[in-house]
Image: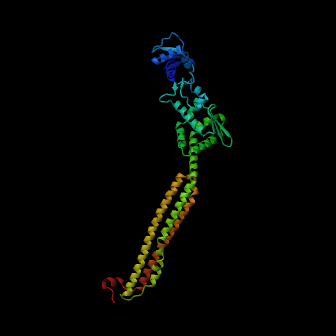
Amino acid sequence: MANDAITWADLLEIYRNSVWVDDHTASLTIVSDGIARTLKLVEKSDRAYHEADIALQDDKAQLAVGSVVEVRIGSPHRSLGLLSKDWDALLASSFSRMREPSAFFIRSDKTHNETLPPTETLLKYRSTLKLVKMLSESALFADQQQAKLVYFADARVEVQVKFAAKDLRSIDPAQVDLLEKVLEGEVHAEQRLGILADAVVELVSGQSAAGRFHYLMQNVDELVRRVHDGYRLFASSFSYSKIRSELEKTQSEYVARIHKTFSDIQGQLLGLPVASVVVATQLKAPTMCGPELLSNIAVVCGACLFAALLIASCINQWMTLDAISNELKGQRTRLNAEFSEIKDLFTGSFDALDGRILWQRWIMGLIVGLSVIGAGFTVRAYLVLTNVDAWSCLVRHGPTS
């Protein structure tokens, strides 16, 4: 304390050690030399007296540590801080409802701006002011002097920031923190505030003018839900063009990959009639071991080998289609989870790809079936035409001329 200047710390020490007898008089316990010096200063300095508005009731009181003196305590100069009878008295000021005073003291529960740990009421008061700050940023205009927020939708909507101490019980600090988290970030900051403004207007439009802010205090969770859902919808709509462009590009790639599963075996398909029907016409009807029998065996083995290779190729391509199908399912799941609001716009593209994969599988199944039938037909023709024991000719006796 320099010269005759009074600081808020000096006053706070006096307030904390005072017991009010009535609105203006208190019993002060001098617990430190600092309190004694402050009382002596206000007694001898007019400036200190007017700034502190504190006076001893007994000019002859002993200002010693441990003594109790009766003092008159009034309102200090506003530049130092606020001294309020109770929370309602503090909240009677419109400025205190818009932002926390830099210095204040509540006589009823001895709460002040530096109270540690903060009381529950102080925490709820600060959460309410945090809500006021976010609403002020979203409003078209915030009147600090009249504690009023102005929005404009179809018509002018005003929200009077008016609440009493009992209303602080309605606020949920955790929900206010969630709302702050939803709004934080530089990306689309204006759009987030715009979504909050729309949510406020929708919630208070059916409420009386005097009860609008208190209704918002009771329904911060609804504000959080609406802002969260509204921003997700905005983000989805904002990303629609980019997503569609990427999806169309990806769709073209998938179509090419699906088409390739068929084109890879298309050349082999041209040999399918040869392996099934044409080769059967090359079979002879041998009656003894000789070149005709060997020719028949070679034709049948070649037809069966061709059918086996073609079936193996089809199985391989089927597995490729399975891999493509799984990739599509993963993309569809991600799109549904991240952009659920616009997922229906892309359902047709995924369904078309799924339909193409299903068609390719039917083709693969048909090819496998025809290969088996063709090979079976060739084997059957061999058995009908060949009346010689081929195994005996090849293994036991060998071919004869």
Residue 150 screen position, x and y as percent: 64, 37
* Residue 86 at least partly seen: yes
Answer above or below: position of 167 versus 20.
Answer: below
Q: Of all residues shown, which one is farthest toward the left?
A: 396
| Nearer the observer, 163 or 12 | 12
Q: Of all residues shown, which one is farthest toward the top?
A: 60
Q: Of all residues shown, which one is farthest toward the bottom?
A: 401
Residue 199 screen position, x and y as percent: 61, 42
* Residue 29 at least partly seen: no
Residue 72 screen position, x and y as percent: 55, 16
Q: Of all residues shown, which one is farthest toward the right?
A: 155
| Nearer the observer, 157 or 366 | 157
Answer above or below: position of 346 versus 127.
Answer: below
The structure residue drawn at horizontal position 64% and vertical position 41%, both measured from the top left corner, is 201
Q: Quadrant of residue 92?
A: top right
Q: Is residue 140 left or right of residue 305?
A: right
The structure residue drawn at horizontal position 46% and vertical position 80%, both measured from the top left corner, is 274
**Display coloring:** rainbow
Q: Is residue 305 left or right of residue 103?
A: left
| Nearer the observer, 52 or 323 | 52
Residue 107 screen position, x and y as percent: 54, 23
Name the image quarter holding the C terminus: bottom left
| Marker count (numbered) | 0
Q: Quadrant of residue 219?
A: top right
